Amino acid sequence: MVDVLLGLQWGDEGKGKIVDYFAPKYDIIARFQGGPNAGHTLYVEGKKVVLHQIPSGIFHQNTLNLIGNGVVLDAVTFKKECESVAAFGVDYRKNLYIAQRTNLILPTHRALDKASELAKGNDKIGSTLKGIGPAYMDKTGRNALRVGDILDKDFMAHYEKLKAKHLELIKGNDFDEEITAWENEFFTAIEFLKTFKIVNGEYWINEQLNAGKTVLAEGAQGSMLDVDFGTFPFVTSSNTISAGVCTGLGIAPQKIREVIGVTKAYCTRVGSGPFPTELFNETGEELRKIGGEFGATTGRPRRCGWIDLVALKFACMINGVTKLVMTKADVLDAFDELDVCVSYKIDGKETDQIPFQMAKMQIDPVYKTFKGWKIDSSALKTAAELPGVMNEYIGFIHEYLGVSVNYVSNGPGRDQLIEIK
Ligand code: GDP
Ligand code: IMO
Ligand code: MG
């Protein structure tokens, strides 16, 4: 049985914290897509850790972790992450498995990412520049090197061929020095990667499932960044939605049970692209300040705004969400009033559906306003303690989306999560 936990907005919903909380209930935590563009924040023994590629179950002794075939793996970032995890006394090799079919990010992929963004100028995506897009292009273009290939005697020849192809594409850009520096780190990291349990991921996970083990698939990014259903072209290059779990791990759809969707109590986005409820005023600034809304991977300030139920309903539909987790409710403590977007006005017409080309239209959000709860909610422990106005806010979201909010997160700590039964 596989449960899925994924982000319903534009990423950074607090997935890392929630996976870390649920991890002890599962035998295996598996990443199925994305790469080091992800930054999942956890607090372990009161200390902050940001994971990019290692599944968020790594801090739990009895949980196995799988980096699935749908991920694009940067060996250099991976090595650094392993070192940061080791500082907590975790034996990271013991419980971590990597699928042979996982695609590798090469130093030239990062250079290609940079070149692509430079060429786009004002239309740039705001990529994390980790080489994600070019690595997935080499996968669908059928050129990529995969983790299993590092054990192959032809690895270097294949690498040089691909590198030459990439260099041809970025001719004219001055990336030589950077590429050489990245390469040095890369080959050391590849040797490091060889010391891990590199497995046939699809057999491994299906054998585990057949033996009755439970899996939590940990999504990266968010549904509105999905390459097919997100705000294209301002998206990432993988399928971030629940469907990506099947192709990203090699499991059949009927193995999936719950789809747990994570949403902030408001909304953020980092990078370019449409964001109808974005606030350009003081309220937006307040959300950023109180919520500490700065990218976990790049440190960039996140764009902030009110919760967007049109986008959330779309995400619930595409993913088949069965349970909702609402994070960062405590960030709204200080506000007198809270707006909730219930529809979009486009060309004078109101709609509750996500249009095809969001990037090319003027979308005016239509809001319903709620009273703020104006208490310090971060100390609350049980559903019974939630103030009435907060229950109204949560209740409306439940009703609008047709999915119940089963958990409310009221702080970054492991213990700051309230279950609503
Ligand atoms: P992810 O990419 O979805 O794992 O999310 P990030 O780690 O990028 O960003 C979420 C940020 O919010 C992190 O700094 C978390 O520590 C923090 N966080 C998570 N849940 C809560 C919450 O309920 N309240 C507050 N105040 N912060 C939270
Ligand atoms: P987590 O897992 C938020 C955004 C980038 C950019 C776009 C494309 O922490 O939620 P890419 O590097 O994939 O070429 O960038 O997607 N992006 C994220 N935004 N959280 C993430 O991951 C993201 N990963 C990518 O900012 O707009
Ligand atoms: Mg993040």
Image (spheres, rainbow, N blue to C red):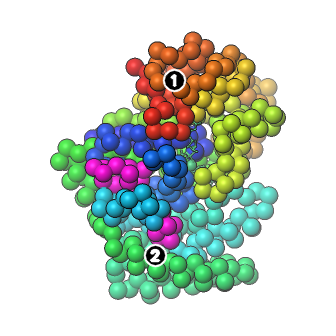
Q: Quadrant of residue 396?
A: top right
SS state under label 2? helix
First of labels 1, 2 by sequence position: 2
Q: Position of residue 77 (x, y in %)?
A: 51, 67
Q: Quadrant of residue 237?
A: bottom right
Q: Which residues are magenta?
A: 55-81
- Is 188 rendered above or below residue 10? below
Look at the numbered disc 1 and say if its residue's Cβ is closer than 8 Å to ligand 1: no
Q: Position of residue 211 (x, y in %)?
A: 17, 48
Is 202 left or right of 265, judged from the image as shown? Answer: left
Residue farthest toward the left in the current orientation of the protein: 211
Evaluate whether residue 155 shows in this view. yes
The residue drawn where x is 65% and y is 38% is 291
Which residue matches tag 2? 189
The residue drawn where x is 29% and y is 62% is 94
The foreground one among 374 and 220 is 374
Quadrant, the N terminus: top left
Residue farthest toward the top in the current orientation of the protein: 388
The foreground one among 124 and 20 is 20
Is 133 left or right of 245, judged from the image as shown? Answer: right
> Is 34 one of the magenta-colored residues?
no
- Is 346 rendered above or below residue 270? above
Evaluate whether residue 149 shows in this view. no
Q: Amino acid at mark 2?
A: Ala
Which residue matches tag 1? 380
Q: Residues within 10 Å of mark 1 (few under 14, many from 20)?
A: some
